[in-house]
Amino acid sequence: MTGARAHDLILLAEPAMLLTGTEPDWVSRSLAAAPWVVVRRATAPPGLLAVGVRGAARHERHAAHIPQQAAARLVRPEDLRTGDGTGTGVGTDTGGAERTAALKTLCEVRPVLEDTACLWGPVGSVGFEKATGRPATTPTSDLDLVIRTETLPTARWASGIHSRLSRFPARVDCQIETPAGAVALAELAAGPPRLVLRTSSGPRLLTHDAVNALAAAQACHWSHRDALGVRERP
């Protein structure tokens, strides 16, 4: 599995490989219905991926590790950005693009985010539903999004996007994902002197410039590893 990142969704080749007998009962039922897991923002031993299993209830989340070869397919948020789910052709119709406010909002935010020229896509319940074809959103679901950037945009840029994303039927919760980690769009838009950067080793409080320096260093590290043929990314 090449370059899996936080929020990517993975279709398991053998769901039973994840089961150890110590997990809650709902985990096996969930995997039987939809053998998909989401890549977590966490460190993992060499050759393994940190993933999470999503259950039917909001509190049903299970952390696990899988061998990289257990992944039959990887779907990124940016593959699912079209409102009708045709980003990659994965999944099936779950009742129309407007089944819930969150799905309707995915259709409506597309022009705003396409204007940024950045990679972006849905995560959370909307992303899971689009990838798996199984209903996961509810009438009260937020639309969770990620915007992929190599460096952290300015507060002014973030403020403009945040303002435009505040006008839709469902609440939009967006993160800016850099090679160093993620920053909440709303926080970046507010322009504080320091930002909470979510990393695989935990949150860090850094200045805007420090986040960009770390992102540049991480991107360089990835390029060096790829040149050496080391494919997994932290």
Image (cartoon, grey):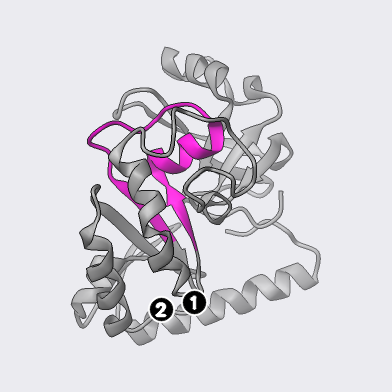
Where is 128 relative to 168, above or below? Answer: above
Dot 2: few (<14), some (14–19), or many (≥20) neighbours within 10 Å? Answer: many
Which residue shows up at 53% across the image and 18% down it?
Answer: 33
Q: Magenta span has 196?
A: no
Viewer-side label of 2, 1 = 2
Q: Nearer the viewer, residue 204 or 77?
A: 77
**Mark 2 highlights which residue?**
152
Local SS, label 2: loop
Residue type at numbered disc 2: Leu
Which region of the structure is painted magenta? 120-146
Task: Tell me if I can see residue 52 in this picture.
Answer: no
Residue type at numbered disc 1: Ala
Which residue shows up at 29% across the image and 55% down it?
Answer: 173
Task: Tell me if I can see residue 123 in this picture.
Answer: yes
Q: CA distance from mark 2 to mark 1?
A: 8 Å
Where is residue 196 shown, x and y percent of the image?
28, 68
Where is residue 176 shown, x and y percent of the image?
39, 67
**Mark 1 highlights which residue?**
215
Q: Nearer the viewer, residue 214 or 117?
A: 117
Asked whether the beta carbons under mark 2 and mark 1 sit within 8 Å of each other, the answer is yes
